[in-house]
Image (tube, rainbow, N blue to C red):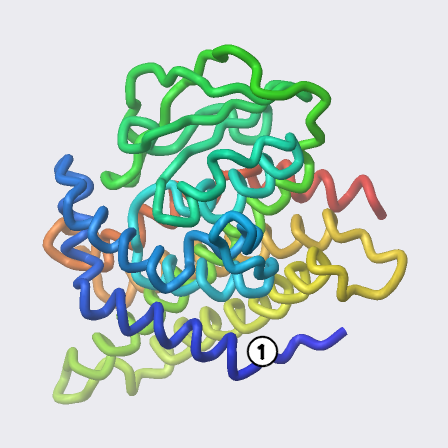
Amino acid sequence: MDFLLSDIHDDLASSIDALLTKADSPAVARAWADGDRTPAEAVFAQLAETGVFGLMVDDAFGGAGAGAVEMVVALEQLGRHGVPGPLAETIAVAPTLLRAAGVTDPLEAIAAGGVVSVAAAPVQPRAADADAVSTVYLLTGETLSVGTAGAALRTVDPARTVSDVDAGAPLATGVDGSAAVDLGALATAAQLLGLGRRMLSLAAEYAVARKQFGRAIGSFQAVKHHLADVAIALEMARPLVHGAAVGVDGGAPEGTDVSRDISAAKVAAADAAHLASRQALQVLGAIGYTREHDLSLYLTKTRALVSAWGTPAAHRARILETL
């Protein structure tokens, strides 16, 4: 199995990184949390122009017809910049679910930047940010419908809400949504990987700039060890995420349990991001949890995404069942 990214993947990551850096993603996330969607909508339009929203949409419907590897490369960058909104649902879950259901009419709108949300009980029983999207899809068993979202409920992440969803008229029955649900977990793992990298970067920068006893705190062995542990955890999780994506795209050896690989990737990425959040807060101190500091954006988003598209316990149980 080849885990190495190509120049195309590196260029995709660099393009998204440059776009989001210029857009001032922390300001976008803060505006979203305050109910102002305009800055995020401008970012979504730019991402759509670069083909990010259409990565998993066939070219016949205006998409790129790319695979899961390209998707995780993009979602890792979106996570690293803390972009708000139901990104895993729009970019990965909805196109896969609609394709499985044979419902292709909405795909062109998604590729063009139409943000949607998805609920799929029991793994994802509530829809993320349903109050900010045009359409909410609901998968109940093997029935796919356009749902009606209830009141938006706040989460630990100020830039994320969740809503209960009531089923409307069925769009399709007999739908196998397992691949879409798996991609939701994989996309979320990629976001968590990006969040972890960003928090490690913030902590390392602070450790160089902050001085105690006339020395940068990054020179103290205890701080070095904390940040080294985070770096190792992230580097161990990254090939699991990329390897699972290769498996989704059909590049894994015969007999590979791709669903198990996705669960392993989600668990590893969630654990690494959680460790990054704890250690970054330890290095920065209480300032890191204040609304004024960007670290708070990534801390709270990490906590919200750890349980999205399958809790760590659920994914560990699935791994155990296959052993």
Q: In the image, is 234 to the left or to the right of 280?
A: right
Residue type at mark 1: give it.
Answer: Leu
Provide the residue designation for mark 1. Answer: 5
Residue 176 at x, y percent in the picture: 71, 31
- In the picture provided, is 226 more to the left or to the right than 233? left
- Front in this rendered view, residue 51 or 218: 51
- Which residue occupies 17% across, 63% down? 24
> At 21% across and 75% down in the image, what residue appears?
206
Residue 211: where, in percent of width, then height? Answer: 15, 81
Position of residue 9 relative to residue 120, above or below, is: below
Instruction: Residue lying at the far right in this picture: please name it.
Output: 255
| Residue 36: x %, y % from top left | 13, 39
Regarding residue 26, the answer to whether it shows in the image is yes
Q: Is residue 287 at all visible to an observer of this figure?
A: no
Viewer-closest of 3 and 289:
3
Which of 316 and 286 lies nearest the eye of the viewer?
Answer: 316
Q: Residues within 10 Å of mark 1 (few under 14, many from 20)?
A: few
- Looking at the figure, which quarter contains the N terminus? bottom right
Between 174 and 189, the one lying in front of the other is 174
Residue located 63% across and 19% down the image = 143
Q: Is residue 168 left or right of residue 255?
A: left
Horizontal side of residue 42 vs 118, given as left or right: left
Q: Is residue 207 above or below residue 219?
A: above
With respect to residue 147, does 276 lie above or below?
below
Return the x and y of residue 110 as percentages of the image width and height.
42, 43
Q: How many marks?
A: 1
> Which residue: 28% across, 73% down?
18
Q: Quadrant of residue 98?
A: top right
Q: Secondary structure at mark 1?
A: loop
